[in-house]
Image (cartoon, rainbow, N blue to C red):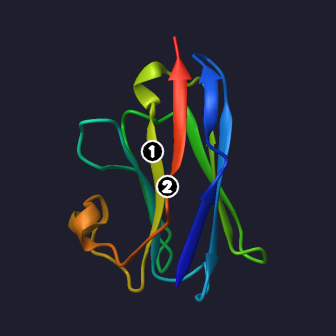
Amino acid sequence: VQLQASGGGLVQAGGSLRLSCTVSGRTLGSGTTGWFRQAPGKEREFVWVKRWGDNKMVYSDSVKGRFTISSDNAKKTLYLQMNSLKPEDTAVYYCAAHAGNLIFSSMTSPRYWDYWGQGTLVTVSS
């Protein structure tokens, strides 16, 4: 299984970016999929995760109302639309996948995920 993230870049505060994550080696609409991010000097944190079996989704409170998720299963691609970006959104963004359906308490922790993309850097200037 390989995950390829792209779409990062430099944007001013208040701007928008759309990240993409293309999945190969497995079906997109199965197991658990998500986006995480890691800011300099900080631990990796979840942004959004989805358990496909029952469509359970969890957004981080820090991005609710600003970030949205979409997918194109035919292209095996996840999108993370990020609007109203803030300097504190600056981080390397990673897409991740888990082969099975993670239980809720494990979904938001990076330690339980099987596969990771290489990350794409998002820098938000003030």
**Residue 60 or residue 95, whichever sits in front:** 95
Mark 1 nearby-residue class (10 Å; few <14, some 14–19, many ≥20): some
Residue 95 appearing in the image: yes
- Left or right of 9, for residue 108: left
Residue 83 appearing in the image: no
Mark 1 touches mark 2? (CB < 8 Å)? yes
Q: Residue 60, image x and y in percent?
A: 37, 43
Q: Residue 22, image x and y in percent?
A: 65, 69
Query: Is 10 situated above or below 33?
Result: above
**Residue 56 or residue 33, whichever sits in front:** 33
Query: Is 67 situated above or below 99?
Result: above
Q: Within the image, what quadrant is residue 16 found in?
A: top right
Q: Secondary structure at mark 1?
A: strand
Residue 111: mark in rendering: none
Residue 119: mark in rendering: 2
Q: Amino acid at mark 1?
A: Val
Q: Secondary structure at mark 2?
A: loop
Q: Which residue, as the protein is rendered here, is positioned at the far right?
A: 74
Which residue, given by chain and number where applicable, does mark 1 sit on? 92
Q: Residue 45, image x and y in percent?
A: 31, 48
- Left or right of 67, for residue 37: left
Q: Residue 26, image x and y in percent?
A: 58, 88
Report, in whole angstroms, how far the alpha carbon at label 1 lies from the one at label 2: 6 Å
Q: Amino acid at mark 2?
A: Gly
